[in-house]
Amino acid sequence: MTTTAPPTWLDLPADTGFGVGNLPYGVFSTPGTGRRTGVAIGDLVLDLAAATGDGVHATGSLNAFLARGPEAWRELRAQLTAWFTDDGHRGTVAPHLVPRSQVTMHLPVEVADYVDFYSSQHHAENLGRMFRPDSEPLTPNWKHLPIGYHGRAGTVQVSGTPVLRPSGQRKAPTDDAPTFGPSQRLDIEAEIGFVVGTPSEPGTRVPLSAFPDHVFGACVVNDWSARDLQSWEYVPLGPFLGKSFLTSVSPWVVPLAALEAARVTPPARDPRPLPYLDDTDGEPWGLDIAIEVRLNGEIVSCPPFDLMYWTPAQQLAHMTVNGASLRTGDLYASGTVSGPQADQRGSFIELSWGGKEPLRLPDGTTRTFLEDGDLVTITATAPGPHGTRIAFGDVTGRIEPAR
């Protein structure tokens, strides 16, 4: 494919995923300065507070800007595009560009609420076959609604935050009673998250068509999971301590406006969803996002987001159909992304098939679940305008021993 990126006076790397068609937002600081909003462009960060003089970008969080709504998002994106593509702006913009290598990235939003879904059919079927081998892989409700749970917003942290191995109650099927100690089945979940900008009124449903009116953009999520804690505690109310110790997000939030070229038709749904979830005759929000999972630098999985059964627009519609309101800074994640192939599974419980089939690494070692010292990196890219690629950045975490 011939790549014809929008012209810019910046000397951008030829393979950058942070071109003019992307312009993701994050929160950064430099030595001796406070946190402020930045936009990634190539290997640089534009200091928005300094470049625009708008104090909303000096708050240390994206929330105040996101709350302004879609018109403000569009206006600033158009202004940034003009700045980077018109050489006449070089003199005023260039002084506010900082090398990305010199900045520290922070959590981009103050997370109001956190919801995690379970929307990959391949992931759900894999777990069903593992844990319910004598039953249908999917539960009876799975193809009728996007299953999800409310997580803990206070433990959502930015990429690079150490992953302290959690402790809790565990009970293997062969044990007579539970024991307490560090998780022995620490896992990842490779996901894509969506950040809400515009709130909604309590009692108001958000229809599928209003998805881009409320959701500002997307990021990469690793919903760390202690499978042994989770399997003992989850009946009958679902995930709790096995999930709530940490959720990691990438520092950059890619605007939905940058993902128009990545939109695809999602898989066919059978049965046809109820009307509030039915996008069959509309413009569905399937997204062609390619994810890569690395363990200690080696690629172990490439989950395909375009195969997700439930789209982010459907997830948002379901999340609010009972009248639950949205708040600026709400984060909801897709659930583990997995494909039909063994090397497309977005969690180690799938990659090792519940620990029964250890994953062999290039150095000859094997893994079932994560060991202390392991470094996990999840990256994502998507088609961008003019044949370019959009990069989401990465979300990383190194496992530290329990305390």
Image (spheres, rainbow, N blue to C red):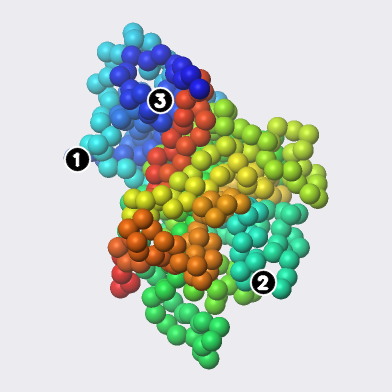
Q: Position of residue 362 (x, y in %)?
A: 36, 55
Which residue: 49% across, 74% down?
228
Q: Which quadrant of the view contains residue 239?
A: bottom right
Q: Mark 2 vs mark 1: which is more N-terminal? A: 1
Q: Amino acid at mark 1?
A: Pro
Which residue: 71% across, 58% down?
142
Q: Where 220 falls versus 210 (above or below)?
A: below
Which residue does the numbered mark 2 point to in the structure image? 132
Q: Where 2 falls versus 384 (above or below)?
A: above
Q: Mark 3 vs mark 1: which is more N-terminal? A: 3
Q: In whole angstroms, how far apart are the C-alphas of marks 3 and 2?
A: 46 Å
Q: In whole angstroms, how far apart are the C-alphas of marks 2 and 1?
A: 53 Å
Q: Position of residue 229 (x, y in %)?
A: 49, 74
Q: Are marks 2 and 1 in contact (CB under 8 Å)?
A: no
Q: Position of residue 127 (x, y in %)?
A: 61, 64
Which residue: 26% across, 29% down?
98
Q: Nearer the viewer, mark 2 or mark 1?
A: 2
Q: Amino acid at mark 2?
A: Arg
Residue 250 in view:
no
Q: Nearer the viewer, mark 3 or mark 2?
A: 2
- Choose between 344 and 33: the one closer to the eye: 344
Q: Secondary structure at mark 2?
A: loop
Q: Position of residue 370 (x, y in %)?
A: 39, 65
- Choose between 274 and 346: the one closer to the eye: 346
Q: Where 63 falls versus 383 (above or below)?
A: below
Which residue does the numbered mark 1 point to in the structure image? 31
Q: Secondary structure at mark 3?
A: loop
Q: Amino acid at mark 3?
A: Gly
Q: Nearer the viewer, mark 3 or mark 1?
A: 3
Residue 371 in view:
yes
Which residue does the numbered mark 3 point to in the structure image? 19
